[in-house]
Amino acid sequence: MTNEHIPALRPGTSTAPAYDPASLDLYAPATAAVELASERGPVVWVPDAYGRMVPIPKRLAPPPMLRPEPRDLTPLPLVDPIAQRFLGAGLGGGALAVGVGYGIGEVISAAAGFTSGAAMWIALAVLAWRMPVRAVADGRRGSTVNIRKAVVKRNHFYG
């Protein structure tokens, strides 16, 4: 096993040279050979990890980033529509129950009041219906009363 990947020491130093990420010596061609554009293929420039633009072959370039879909910015309702339906059904059902309960209460109170108030009015109507027609037509009392006064005097002598 050889240590070819370790850089050589500079004369007069005892440690290996520090790695300099800003230098472009790693990308410099080793020879000054002429390279024709038709031999090389298309090249694209991409930023490296340090922000510099570096040429790489197009076939090795990362795929272009797709544009994200535009977001829907329409305002949403304050309360969920399904929750609104449940709330409406609950309020409507409660109002229906209150109305039915109130109606049943009114019917029961009317039935209870019928025995006292309405029965009295029915009795008066029946009495008025049975009143003789003659009394209503004359404007007088309906019945004829003959008063016979008899005075009987007796003298008693207790003496």
Image (cartoon, rainbow, N blue to C red):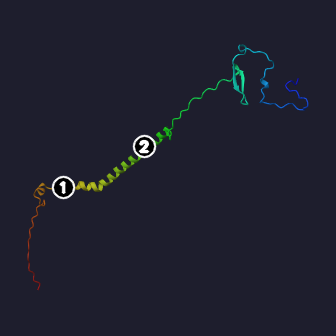
The residue at which mark 1 appears reads as: 128
Q: Residue at x 72, y 23 (%)?
A: 55
x, y percent for residue 130: 17, 54
Q: Is disc 1 placed on a helix, strand or loop?
A: helix
Left or right side of 29 for 144: left
2 vs 1, front mark: 2
Asked if residue 133 can be seen in this view, the reply is: yes
Would you place residue 35 above or below residue 50 in this image?
above
Residue 21 in which image quadrant: top right
**Nearer-the-camera pick, 103 or 17:** 17
Classed neighbour count for the residue bearing mark 1: other residues with Cα under 10 Å, few (<14), some (14–19), many (≥20): few
**Nearer-the-camera pick, 66 or 41:** 41
Q: Residue at x 31, y 54 (%)?
A: 113
x, y percent for residue 93: 43, 43
Which label belongs to residue 137?
Answer: none
The residue at which mark 2 appears reads as: 92
Q: Are marks 2 and 1 in contact (CB under 8 Å)?
A: no
Residue 62 in which image quadrant: top right
Would you place residue 146 above or below residue 102 in this image?
below
Say what amino acid the circle numbered 1 marks. Answer: Ala
The earlier-in-sequence mark between 2 and 1 is 2
